[in-house]
Image: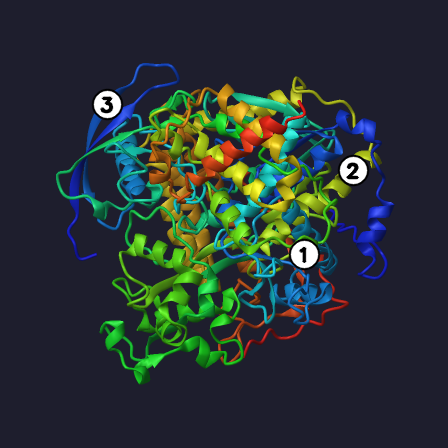
Amino acid sequence: MSEKKFGVTVRVWRQAGPGEKGRMESYEVKGVDPDMSFLEMLDVLNEDLVRRGETPIAFDSDCREGICGCCGLVVNGDVHGPDEHSTVCQLHMRRFKDGDVITVEPWRVKSFPVLKDLVVDRSSLDRIMAAGGYVSVDTGAAPDANSVPVDKDDAEEAMDAAACIGCGACVAACPNGAAMLFTGAKISQLALLPQGGPEKAKRALDMVEAMDAEGFGNCTNEYECEAVCPKEVKVANIARMNREFLLANFLSKR
Amino acid sequence: MKLDARIPAGPIEKKWDKHRFDLKLVNPSNKRRFDIIVVGSGLAGAGAAASLGELGYNVKVFTMHDSPRRAHSIAAQGGINAAKNYPNDGDSVWRLFHDTVKGGDYRAREANVYRLAQVSNGIIDHCVALGVPFAREYGGLLANRSFGGAQLSRTFYARGQTGQQLLLGAYSAMMRQVAAGTVKVFPRREMTELVIKDGRARGIIARDLVTGKLESHAGHAVLLCTGGYANVFYLSTNAATCNVSAAWAAYRKGAGFANPCFTQIHPTCIPRSGDHQSKLTLMSESLRNDGRVWVPRNRGDRRSPGSIPEEERDYFLERRYPAFGNLVPRDIASRAAKTEVDAGKGVGPTGQSVYLDFRDSIARKGEDKIRAEYGNLFDMYHQITDENGYRTPMRIYPAPHYTMGGLWVDYDLMTTVPGLFALGEANFSDHGANRLGASALMQGLADGFFVIPYTLGGYLAGNRLEAAADSDPEFRRAADESGLKFKRLLSVKGKKTPSEFHRRLGEVMWNECGMARNEAALKRALVKIPEIREEFRENLAVGGGAEELNQTLERAGKVADFLDFAELLVRDALERRESCGGHFREESCTPEGEAKRDDAGFSHAAVWEHAGEGKAPLLNKEALTFEHIKPSERSYK
């Protein structure tokens, strides 16, 4: 708080619309406060652009506390920026210094087409969810919540997987553009809980099929996804997904 | 405006059962012929879409986000209440009902609250079945904790991410219906107008936020599940895009707006650091279970907290409310903090905060224990402030968090516009003048999963609905109105951004209509708000066009509606010359400075009716009667 305000140069990807040619553009941002968040710095820049009659930089963000999963930028080559296991909305300008040149790019993934500037279309992840990321139970049909005890460790592990915010950072960080951490996390969560048991084979087959149909790549054990995941979802979930998938194939009635 | 709450007759325990029996049913094979429009995909919206889809209705869900899973319900941390009484500590449906009515300071409708308590247990059952990974004990059964304002443990939780896990549960149930073909999701759409035909809500106009195109969507009923309006204060714990626009569009088309002045200021937020601040971050009030709130006894004491000796600290909540101490309800904790700050005892660089100190808990339980329970909150605090909450007390200050007011609804959750329903935070029904912790998630899911599937069927089966189509002139007119609104915003070509106006509005609202309100300040606000609005009309800068992805235009539309709505909120606060719950009028307090209700004058819901552009809104009243929970002074001493 006692530190002085400073200035940075932001090099940012500009693209007018889907399928259009984009380019990097540079902007000076002055009066940066170390307590500002990174996105607030972009807000300040955008306010300036609007006042000058220029087109502001489009980017997605909403909760600004790392839980909604809207935001996602590549900052100086780092997915979600330099801080470990956090979203870019949680990044603060105290991580930078006067005169820094900061490169800002969108997720670069075939299955997440750019809509404008830094905004990408991640609806492919919703389609994977629709393929089986649920337990088929109608409202009102459930037995008493305590009728099925769940092993505490299993419940904790399911929660670790369920913490995924669907931001797509795992895909953006993967050299193959794989969505296996995302998909594996959901398959794991529901496979670990007795409630998800009856459908687990079908779920694994259907979600993997949907994932492949969306054009996501395959896992080659780079571990980049786990390294950038804001919620520290572990690659063990991918291993579990593969086990569930193999088992499902082996035992499949299809 | 006719306000008929249509509360079923009979004893309160039997009302809902009887009503469910009395409601007409839609033939199962006819359900697919009904198109239901759901705006918003939070707990209420996703829950409604899922359960209506399961029944076979044809549901269209609109969300302004890129995915329905982003709705702001996701940010709720602490938990969800239910009357399960698993801990055997004396809970019951009746006690949850009692606590909610009392916590709301006797400004909610008894019948609705009773139903909420009644269906609360089913929510937990259903969410467990959906695979929500709630916290569990070693025996494998569900864990409970106590939460602000409750003296028993009825709160279910999933670490500090209960809202996220419940939303993902409701979202997954909805995605199952997407796969089944009963639900269609329209992402990146914003509702801009409500369409009324023959006196009934028959559809909406939505703007495609990628192309900017305006779309018409016709249906047999419209469900607004669009959340609250705390962003009228600019800085709040709400996500940046939370807004009042859909509810405001409904109000302008005839839906009554109830108790807009009932806003909740949450006591444990991270204080603002500067003008650049875009939102405030809440830290779960579960922190108050182990943290002690204090300020220096002497005003202007600028010493570091560690060097202020015990006898020079004022643990003001423990001092003023010995029975509840640091666990008093949100409104009381917030006002007490403001009192200390106003007396010049605030701490931190701006003097606008109080300490939340874990020193004693760490000494008693050990740092590891505290880390296990609240580690993620300490990390979050560190990330934002660069301070270590284990070594030095956290600094907290209240911030707008939730809005109890909203569209007026009857027992069926229907607004004063036939066919228009409001669910979750968007309605006014269950929390009165103050919401208890962990009750918002409960209400959103109760409305979506367990109330609307019945009451909507009753409406559809009980009324003859004429045909309505996207091509009807009513839709074209509404689309033209929307188009004109965006054109006007773009044509000003002034010098100030939408955010600059929003920030100014927020300052007025926080200073003149915030935690403590008085007649003079509210009247000042009624002068200042139109001034800002006037300048907004003359000096707004937006840039770009209407038919493209234009986030500045989206923001301008929201700010325009907040500027109109803010005036209604202030007017309501001025009209309610009593203190109750989150609404504190300085003119109405006890000699000790505690809030004083005026049951003779204000035991009603104030329901505002749009009287036309430029005309003063009309005030209608729904009298509230309390047959079961006798209004008493809410004392937490």
Q: Are marks 3 and 2 in contact (CB under 8 Å)?
A: no
> Residue visible at 15% across and 51% down?
A4
Marks 2 and 1 belong to one chain: no
**Quarter of the view holding residue B54:** top right
Query: For the residues marked 3 and 2, what is the alpha-carbon distance in whole angstroms?
Result: 54 Å
Q: Chain of mark 3?
A: A
Asked if residue A101 lies left or right of residue B214, the reply is left
Report which residue position mark 1 lands on.
Answer: A146
Above or below, comparing residue B19 to residue B633 in the picture? above
> Residue visible at 71% across and 66% down?
B92
Report which residue position mark 2 lands on.
Answer: B457
**Element assignment for label 3:** strand
**Element assignment for label 1:** helix
Asked if residue B571 lies left or right of residue A116, the reply is right
Quadrant where the N terminus of chain A lies? Answer: bottom left
Amino acid identity at mark 2: Gly
Question: x and y percent of residue B444 in the render?
Answer: 62, 48
Report which residue position mark 3 lands on.
Answer: A24
**Element assignment for label 2:** helix
Q: Chain of mark 2?
A: B
**Residue situated in front as seen by the camera: A190 or B163:** A190
Above or below, comparing residue A98 to residue B363 in the picture? above
Q: Which mark is residue B400?
A: none
Question: x and y percent of residue B478 in the render?
Answer: 59, 26
